[in-house]
DNA sequence: AATGAATGAGTCTTCATTCAT
DNA sequence: GATGAATGAAGACTCATTCAT
């Protein structure tokens, strides 16, 4: 994970160029990405072999390199892809909600729903994203930051509207929000029990909104 | 990170056998462990070479294997060691505090103080611990769980004494507490700015205790 | 360079079949050959990719294999082609010269002129031809030998007419002649200075004809 | 053959440090080098496998990399080593000879003797040294140049003493001398007949000194 | 005929681990 | 106990070649 990440040319492909060839290429790209996420979720990135990914995707080893520059970039593309679509969904869903509390609750639910629906992706995000400080630093500059900013916008909006306490540091509040979601998901993927993630949304929102204390802030 | 973790024979060495030889052995063991944490924090576990650790510790490559069974076990021992002493400190400090809110505040502060004082250790815990779902699952069975239980005890104690809301899921509350700390520390190690961690303790406790909302829980 | 060289079917194509199709085929064959010589001269045979040659020739990778059996055979065909036309020119030019010294001088000049005019070809001949003892052995059986025999004929002709010393080994004399030309050309392609090759012809002929010594052979 | 050549640290090892360990290291280095020359002479550099060289030297594959940085550098070290000792011998032998003709004859004989005694080395020098224009250019800057300068010194010395014709270009004369030797050796390694190289020395010197012509230079 | 996406065999190199000293 | 030279298994990646279109 030492090379800089560069978005695959794919990201900027003109949608106009979607002839049969481009569509087939797109499909194979997706298939390799999905296979990679599965394999990495099962064995961890370091223990995953490029040949494992290739054979699960039903292509030859060399074919991988027609779509990705290196093993590292498969992981980066997978994380990037997941985040990109996740953030797009989040923006869409939140745009129709008026109050900050509603937005916060919606975001929490969305986070749990998306990851709860795709355990391999959740495993990769919760584990491999943290693999290396350097990688995380770089990735977080690009995608994670934009997710955290979405959260901060909600907090600030609530503070401005008076829904949320104006005395709080928004940065700290975001850390609590993201950290809580992060840990709930991590606990879920590590748990041997098989439970649903989404139903926890309201409990989590409740703690974040009102705290654990029975009293009031001094 | 594929082998099962087995505590180094060292862990159970009779403290009675502490002649000069044993003391020297202990010192070298510590030196290797500290070197390992530094090297891994700098380069990540996968990119760290056993020979890097050896030369930083001032011993020959082969000597490492007189103290550890494998490269994996160096990482495990380092994490294990850090957690063990951390939990001992936590128990000591919390035992003299009577109320749940005080304990929670103390725990938050302790967490930030300990990691804030040892950045390499924080880097390793925040990144390498997550490296592999399998590894994390195993480790969390052993040490992390005991830390999370300490947190749960505080939550439950607060609920029983009426300080904390009894309607909350203690498991969710713990996730929020641990997740918040976790994310604050991760943000710190990734930040390019150089700030102190411990001063954030009260803000974090405040959010956790009273929530972000200006209103009351329904 | 492990396969035996077999002249491309092309070599024996009936010139009668020279319709438009055949002419187009011939042109593309030439274009690929010329591209191959350029690419190989620039990067060396081992570092030249078939796809480099194809794209420089403006054809698809697969098209190469409609004209050549393998990458090795492209190199062989290029060398073969160069030598064949070179030897034809040599025979033509020498046939109108009566004396051995004149022929030797003409051959030296021709050698330097032809290679001096086509540096990429010179590079390939001086470097890639020597790449492998096995390949050189085979090639020299086929084309180089015929060039060396042309040289030997000149030497013998001179010895018979009394122009050249009869006591010399003709084989040694040929080695000196070819070796001198070979090294002058190699020095030229390696030189950073940019000079003309042909003007050196008379100096070289002079050394070969009369030696470096100021005295007479004993 | 793309990396720059750097003389192995070995070249500059203090001879004082020749304990048993250093001696053993030196021996193994020599053994690997000799095995490499043999294997490369048999199969050509491109077709030689590092594992072939290792097994012929009786060491593990990985051991090669304790002595050489890469496969390329094995070849470079072999050529470098051969040239270095060759030039040392040449200087020694020529230093005791007073006249230019004698020196030229001695050099020709030495060249043929040394290569005639070690056919694998001759094969490697005659074929692999020419493999790539870039490599040859670099190598010739370092070692070959110093050999050619030795030749040029002899020519100039002869011209100054009046033994050799002063009107000749010394550069051309050197090309004829080196080229002749080069080609005689190449013919020898390619020949299927098994003959001695050294006995050809006087014939070659004869041609170089007095030329092929029966007449006198005009 | 021409294409170029796909193939998969092949190998250099790394590095955790061992063991003779 | 300590050393560090030696080991050799393992895998990412390349690229000549094929073949369905």
Image: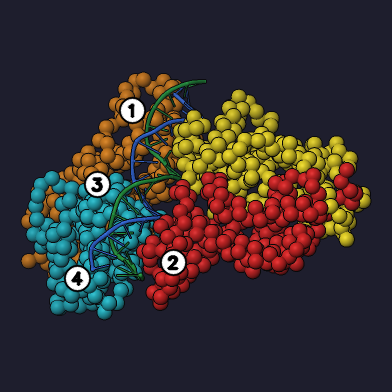
Chain colours: A yellow, B red, C orange, D cyan, E blue, F green
Q: Residue furthest right?
A: A162
Q: Position of residue A83 (x, y in %)?
A: 68, 42
Report whether C1 appears left or right of A4.
left
Crowdedness near tag 1: few (<14), some (14–19) or many (≥20) residues, C-alpha within 10 Å: few
Element under disc 1: helix
Q: Position of residue B155 (x, y in %)?
A: 73, 53
Q: Position of residue D73 (x, y in %)?
A: 34, 59
Element under disc 3: helix
Give the alpha-carbon distance from disc 3 to disc 2, as whole Å.
62 Å
Q: Residue at x 41, y 63 (%)?
A: B67
> Tag 3, which chain?
D
Q: Nearer the viewer, residue A146 or D116?
A: A146
Crowdedness near tag 4: few (<14), some (14–19) or many (≥20) residues, C-alpha within 10 Å: some
Q: Specify the label residue D90 is tagged with.
A: 4
Same chain for marks 3 and 2?
no
Same chain for marks 4 and 1?
no
Residue occupied by mark 3:
D43
Same chain for marks 3 and 4?
yes
N-terminal of the pair, mark 3 or mark 4, is 3
Q: Specify the label residue B14 is tagged with.
A: 2
Q: Specify the label residue C10 is tagged with.
A: 1
């Amino acid at each position: 994970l030492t090379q800089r990440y560069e978005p695959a040319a794919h990201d900027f492909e003109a949608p106009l160029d979607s002839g049969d060839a481009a569509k087939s290429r797109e499909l194979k790209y997706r298939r390799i990405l999905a296979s990679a996420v599965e394999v990495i979720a099962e064995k961890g990135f370091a223990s995953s072999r490029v040949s494992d990914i290739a054979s699960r995707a039903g292509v030859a080893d060399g074919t991988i390199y027609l779509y990705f520059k290196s093993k590292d970039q498969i992981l980066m593309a997978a994380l990037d892809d997941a985040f990109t679509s996740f953030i797009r969904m989040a923006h869409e869903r939140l745009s129709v909600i008026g109050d900050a509390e509603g937005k916060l609750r919606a975001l929490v639910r969305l986070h749990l729903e998306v990851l709860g629906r795709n355990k391999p992706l959740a495993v990769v995000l919760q584990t491999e994203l943290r693999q290396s400080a350097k990688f995380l630093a770089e990735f977080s500059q690009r995608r994670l930051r934009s997710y955290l900013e979405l959260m901060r916008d909600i907090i600030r909006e609530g503070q401005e509207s008076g829904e949320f306490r104006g005395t709080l540091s928004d940065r700290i509040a975001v850390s609590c929000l993201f950290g809580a979601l992060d840990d709930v998901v991590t606990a879920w993927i590590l748990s041997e029990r098989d439970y649903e993630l989404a139903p926890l949304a309201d409990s989590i929102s409740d703690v974040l909104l009102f705290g654990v204390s029975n009293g009031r802030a001094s």
